[in-house]
């Protein structure tokens, strides 16, 4: 399996976990505006990219 496919496969799962954690943390903290939730989800999605690449590189 190519490195790109591994990164994309990990990104699907890691990104959704990170987004869920961030959105849950924002809701618990009382920051339930649409913009803060959207920005938090986008930030978590972007952070998941390098994390996925690091994990895929370790397992390749």
Image: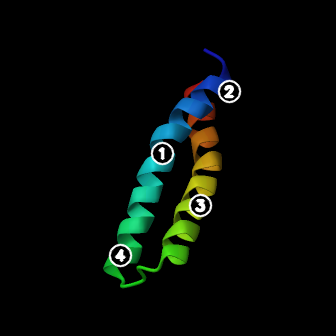
Question: To which residue does mark 4 refer?
Answer: 27
User: Looking at the image, do the residues carrying marks 1 and 2 touch, with CB atoms under 8 Å apart?
Assistant: no
Label located before the other in sequence (1 or 2) = 2
Q: Nearer the viewer, residue 10 or 39?
A: 39
Mark 3 against mark 1, which lies toward the viewer? Answer: 3
> Where, by quadrant of the figure, is residue 46 drawn?
bottom right
Which secondary structure, mark 3? helix
x, y (%) of residue 48?
A: 57, 50
Q: Residues within 10 Å of mark 4 (few under 14, many from 20)?
A: some
Q: Which residue is drawn at 45% across and 48% down?
A: 16
Up-down: is 4 above or below 39?
Answer: above
> Where, by quadrant of the figure, is residue 54 drawn?
top right
Q: Which mark is residue 4?
A: 2
Label located before the other in sequence (4 or 3) = 4
Label located before the other in sequence (3 or 1) = 1
Which secondary structure, mark 4? helix
x, y (%) of residue 6?
A: 58, 27
Q: Which mark is residue 52?
A: none
Q: Which residue is drawn at 64% across and 39% down?
A: 53
Q: Residues within 10 Å of mark 1 (few under 14, many from 20)?
A: some
Question: To which residue does mark 1 refer?
Answer: 14
The Cα atoms of the two marked residues, 4 and 3, are separated by 16 Å
The Cα atoms of the two marked residues, 1 and 2, are separated by 15 Å
Question: To which residue does mark 3 refer?
Answer: 42
Compared across the picture, whether 25 is left or right of 57 comes to left
């Amino acid at each position: 399996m190519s490195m790109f496919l591994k990164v994309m496969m990990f990104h699907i799962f890691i990104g959704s976990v990170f987004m869920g954690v961030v959105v849950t943390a924002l809701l618990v903290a009382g920051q339930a505006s649409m913009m803060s939730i959207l920005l938090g989800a986008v930030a978590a999605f972007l952070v998941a990219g390098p994390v996925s690449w690091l994990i895929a590189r370790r397992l390749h």
